Image: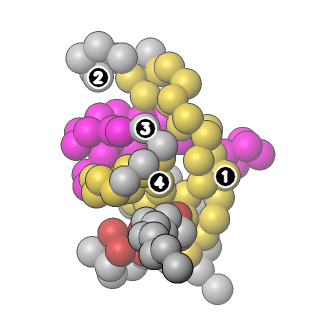
Amino acid sequence: MHQAAATARARVPDIVSRLAKFFPDATPVRIPIRLSRTEGDGTGHDYTFFQETVIEFGTPREVLFALDRPLEFADRVLLESRDGTLRAEASVVAVQYHPERTVVAARFLKDVPNWIVKP
């Protein structure tokens, strides 16, 4: 009999929940979004499509999600929900790197009222 070891891929909500522990107001949400990011010095409003993903947790001021590609602290991103109810600029405030995934928390640059409704 042969023994083999395999690395189990953590489920995305599980790895995002690890970062969510640092945000006491975080609530599970699951909102599909289109994520774009600024190019160059990050000060302009020229956004380039980056990746589609799902917001796994949110607070009134932050969103938490996982990506297949890396983002860096202070990167500026544009978050757009598929149904158009969310379109907001944010700045990356926390990053955790995992094998094949990057978990990100981004804070809205302006107030986004009522984007998250708690039951």
Task: Name the outermost residue toward the front.
Answer: 1
Label 2, label 4: how far apart the Cα atoms are: 21 Å
Query: How many numbered discs sit on the rendered protein?
Result: 4
Q: Earlier in the sequence, mark 1 or mark 2?
A: 1
Say the numbered circle drawn on residue 66. 4
Structural crowding at the residue carrying mark 1, measured as other residues with C-alpha within 10 Å and reported as few (<14), some (14–19) or many (≥20): some
Q: Identify the mark at residue 48; answer none if there is no mark.
A: none
Q: Quadrant of the C terminus?
A: bottom right
Residue type at the position of mark 1: Pro
Image spot of residue 103 (x, y percent): 38, 56
Residue position for label 1: 32
Say which residue appears at 66% left-offset and 52% top-offset.
Answer: 32
Q: Which of marks 3 and 2 is nearer the N terminus?
A: 2
Nearer the N terminus, badge 4 or badge 1?
Answer: 1
| Few, some or many residues within 10 Å of mark 3 (<14, 14–19, 20+) | few
Q: Residue 42 carries which label?
A: 2
